[in-house]
Image: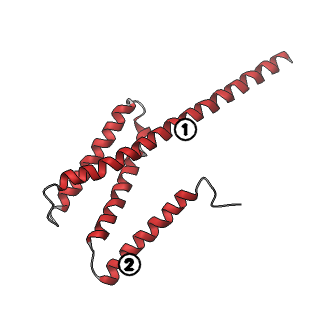
């Protein structure tokens, strides 16, 4: 039995990379007794990726709301979180005068791309599931017709 195959190869590489990179950051902070900007930026990217993935994964809870409204609500929730994190970080380190704009763009562009890929994939999977359901229903109706004629 193969544990790593074509369908999960890239996700496994991403998980291993993330674990190694996070371990490296923690180890550097411990050994060097210094937490640099690069380490902070990397951890911030991880935190925002975690937050965005968690919010996107909850779309199914809002099935009664139109999808465009859900997408907009998710984005507004996330960008509010990003701005809150940016504001909170200003108490520990001075922000550049364009810091909020830079965080807005740094989050919005990758999130927009990721959300588009996610929702396109979701529509594709729903279409495949609907096609499978149609085939099952067709098979069941043919089976019931055949059993009635016997």
Residue 120 location, x and y as percent? 47, 38
- Does the residue at mark 2 contact the one at mark 1 (Cβ under 8 Å)? no
Badge 2 local density, few (<14 within 10 Å), some, or many (20+)? few
Quadrant assignment, res 87: bottom left
Residue 72 location, x and y as percent? 31, 37
- Look at mark 1 in the image and give the residue it sits on: 125
Q: Is residue 56 left or right of residue 107?
A: right
Q: Is residue 35 left or right of residue 11?
A: left
Q: Residue furthest top?
A: 149
Q: Secondary structure at mark 2?
A: helix
Badge 1 local density, few (<14 within 10 Å), some, or many (20+)? few
Residue 94 location, x and y as percent? 14, 64
- Name the one closer to the observer, 28 or 58: 28
- Name the one closer to the observer, 110 or 129: 110
Seen at 68% across and 28% down, the residue is: 135
- Is 63 rendered above or below residue 145? below
- Look at mark 2 in the image and give the residue it sits on: 27
Alpha carbon separation for disc pair 2 and 1: 40 Å
- Is 117 rendered above or below residue 91? above
Q: Residue furthest right?
A: 150
Q: Is residue 106 left or right of residue 92?
A: right
For the N terminus, which image quadrant? bottom right
Seen at 31% across and 42% down, the residue is: 75
First-in-chain label (2 vs 1): 2
Q: Is residue 64 left or right of residue 96?
A: right
Quadrant assignment, res 40: bottom left
């Amino acid at each position: 039995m193969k544990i790593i195959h074509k369908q999960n190869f890239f996700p496994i590489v991403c998980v291993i990379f993330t674990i190694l990179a996070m371990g490296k950051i923690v180890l550097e902070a411990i050994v060097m007794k210094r937490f640099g900007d690069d380490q902070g930026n990397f951890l911030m990217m991880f935190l925002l990726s975690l937050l965005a993935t968690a919010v996107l994964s909850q779309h199914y809870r809002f099935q009664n709301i139109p999808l465009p409204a859900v997408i907009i609500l998710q984005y507004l929730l996330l960008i509010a979180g990003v701005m809150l994190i940016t504001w909170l970080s200003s108490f520990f380190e001075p922000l550049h005068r364009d810091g909020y704009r830079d965080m807005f763009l740094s989050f919005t562009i990758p999130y927009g791309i990721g959300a588009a890929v996610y929702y396109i994939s979701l529509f594709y999977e729903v279409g495949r599931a609907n096609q499978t359901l149609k085939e099952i229903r067709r098979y069941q109706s043919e089976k019931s017709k055949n059993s009635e004629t016997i």
